[in-house]
């Protein structure tokens, strides 16, 4: 590894950082993280902070999970790579697919299609949804419906169902036939409705109206995050997903749950869909499947979809889709170890318990600081929405957001800024003391 001076000089010179303006990164280079231990990371200047971002919603087990590191090392030694394309398979991928079917049995998931991450998983789900309808002889069902404020990664399909202009605008025209409905976001919504349950009904009605407007027989699927993450931790009332399931059933539309963030405990349940006890038709997962130790994701397929593919005798059933790294043996070995640790430590339960403590901290900060317009949380995913004026709810500017995050960093905690939201997604191995540390740093920052 080159020295700190080399890294500082070249930080943003030859690398374009995702979700950043290259010139801005050159003018104000990002922090270089050198080391991780427990729930802490250390930067190139030797400063150690608590990582309240959890990498990027994914390092649920923290940075010192030896069983994952050892599983990766063992698998690298035995077989660093082999393809899962037709004709060959590998042990860890078979075992992990079995494990995922057990893990998400309550959601009715029976099959796994492995990918390299969340965007791949979403892309796979959208493609399989279209293919499903072709196999069933309803080739007109090609449209997708999604939530405004939803985030579904950055491939062309995922960006098309994305509900945020920042991820769409520069890449348009995107996929045609995608339509968005309002998210059940109580702080800001077109209905001026603040009661979450009533809002859930209004948004569900908007979905049904849109289906009627488009014609149900042209709609392939509705995709949603059970708790919206990157859009600012929008937590729908649990009745929302139940209503969505009923509507999708009524119109024979597939429901895709994007669980890239909510899968494996982050929202205080093993799956976000489990909060509302909903069985989606497909689920997308990634991130915590390896706790970030190896890039891996999967699209999980429920019984209804699987049966149609597997019973197919037309020319439409073969899956003309896959990635070189689908079922990567090292990734799957990492996944098996990560899931074993996740279950052993009962991380969903810890996320729920620490999440409650974090919620009280955030509510107190809202009372204390006029800058905080709204706080939202579920398990260990949370957002503070900052405003420059509580009455008009005018969003706080970029300079304010950066100043808060920088001050919190000085106080020992890494936060993530997304628009006017401070996003918290710490490792799920968090302790009560860590929650207090996050609260103190937020307080200092605000
Ligand atoms: N879906 C959701 C809900 C996400 O939050 C993300 C990433 O944050 C993605 C999809 C895309 O995942 P990736 O960045 O691994 O491609």
Image (cartoon, helix red, strand yellow):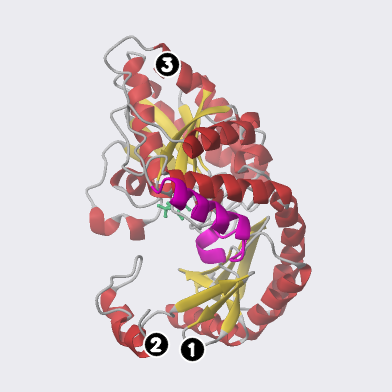
Q: Nearer the viewer, residue 345 or 187?
A: 345
**Do tag 1 and tag 2 residues touch (Cβ < 8 Å)?**
yes
Dominant SS in magenta = helix
Q: Which residue occupies the extreme left position in the image?
A: 173
**Tags 1 and 3 touching, CB below 8 Å:** no
Q: Using the image, tell me which numbered label, if any, was put on residue 310.
A: 3
Mark sitting on residue 45: 1
Residue at image position (71%, 79%) is: 368
Q: Is residue 91 above or below residue 164?
A: above
Give how far across and how far down residue 260 sits, in percent: 50, 48
Please report whichever mark, 1 or 2, sits nearer to the chain's N-terminal start. Answer: 2
Inspect the magenta stretch and tell me whether residue 134 lies in it: no
In the rendered image, residue 275, in percent from the top left (x then y), is placed at 67, 41
Image location of residue 392, percent across then percent down: 54, 71
Residue 165 occupies which quadrant of the picture? bottom left
**Magenta-drawn segment:** 54-80
Disc 2 is placed on an element classified as: helix
Residue that appears at 50% across and 39% down: 92
Closer to us: 211 or 256: 256
- Which residue carries the number 2 mark? 4
- Counting residues from the start of the chain, the first of labels 2 and 3 encountered is 2
Instruction: Please state, as top left, top right, bottom left or bottom right, where the C terminus lies in the image.
Output: bottom right
Which residue is most to the top?
313
Q: Judge by depth and name the residue closer to the eye, 216 or 233.
A: 233
The mark that comes first in sequence, 1 or 3, is: 1
**Measured from the top left, where is residue 298 in percent x and y?**
46, 40
């Amino acid at each position: 590894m080159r020295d700190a001076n080399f890294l500082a000089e070249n930080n943003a010179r030859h690398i374009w950082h995702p979700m950043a303006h290259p010139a801005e990164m050159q003018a104000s280079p990002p922090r270089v993280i050198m080391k991780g231990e427990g729930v802490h990371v250390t930067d190139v200047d030797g400063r150690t902070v608590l990582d309240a971002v959890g990498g990027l919603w994914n390092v649920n087990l923290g940075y010192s999970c030896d069983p994952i590191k050892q599983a990766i090392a063992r698998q690298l030694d035995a077989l660093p790579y082999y393809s899962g394309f037709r004709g060959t398979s590998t042990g860890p991928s078979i075992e992990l697919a079995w494990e995922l079917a057990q893990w998400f049995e309550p959601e009715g998931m029976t099959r796994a299609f492995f990918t390299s991450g969340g965007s791949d998983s979403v892309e796979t789900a959208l493609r399989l949804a279209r293919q499903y309808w072709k196999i069933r002889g309803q080739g007109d069902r090609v449209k997708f419906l999604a939530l405004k404020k939803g985030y579904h990664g950055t491939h062309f399909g995922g960006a098309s169902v994305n509900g945020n202009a920042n991820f769409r605008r520069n890449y348009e025209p995107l996929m045609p036939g995608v339509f968005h409905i309002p998210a059940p976001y109580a702080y800001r919504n077109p209905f001026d409705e603040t009661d979450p349950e009533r809002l859930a009904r209004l948004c569900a009605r908007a979905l049904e109206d849109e289906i009627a407007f488009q014609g149900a027989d042209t709609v392939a699927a509705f995709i949603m995050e059970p708790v919206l993450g990157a859009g600012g931790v929008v937590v729908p009332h649990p009745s929302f997903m139940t209503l969505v399931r009923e509507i999708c059933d009524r119109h024979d539309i597939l429901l895709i749950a994007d669980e890239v963030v909510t899968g494996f405990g982050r929202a205080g349940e093993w799956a976000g869909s489990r909060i509302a006890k909903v069985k989606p038709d497909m689920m997308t997962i990634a991130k915590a499947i390896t706790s970030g130790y190896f890039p891996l994701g999967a699209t999980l397929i429920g019984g209804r979809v699987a049966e149609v593919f597997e019973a197919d005798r037309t020319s439409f059933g073969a899956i003309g889709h896959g990635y070189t790294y689908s079922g990567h043996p090292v990734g799957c070995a990492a996944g098996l170890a990560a899931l074993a640790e996740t279950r052993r430590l009962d991380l969903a339960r810890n996320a729920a318990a620490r999440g409650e403590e974090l919620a009280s901290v955030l509510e107190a900060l809202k009372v204390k600081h006029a800058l905080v317009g709204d706080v939202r949380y579920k398990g260990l995913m949370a957002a503070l929405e900052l405003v420059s004026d509580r009455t008009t709810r005018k969003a706080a500017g970029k300079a304010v957001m950066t100043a808060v995050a920088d001050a919190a960093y000085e106080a020992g905690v890494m936060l993530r800024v997304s628009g006017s939201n401070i996003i918290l997604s710490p490792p799920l191995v968090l302790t009560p003391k860590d929650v207090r540390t996050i609260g103190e740093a937020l307080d200092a920052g605000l």
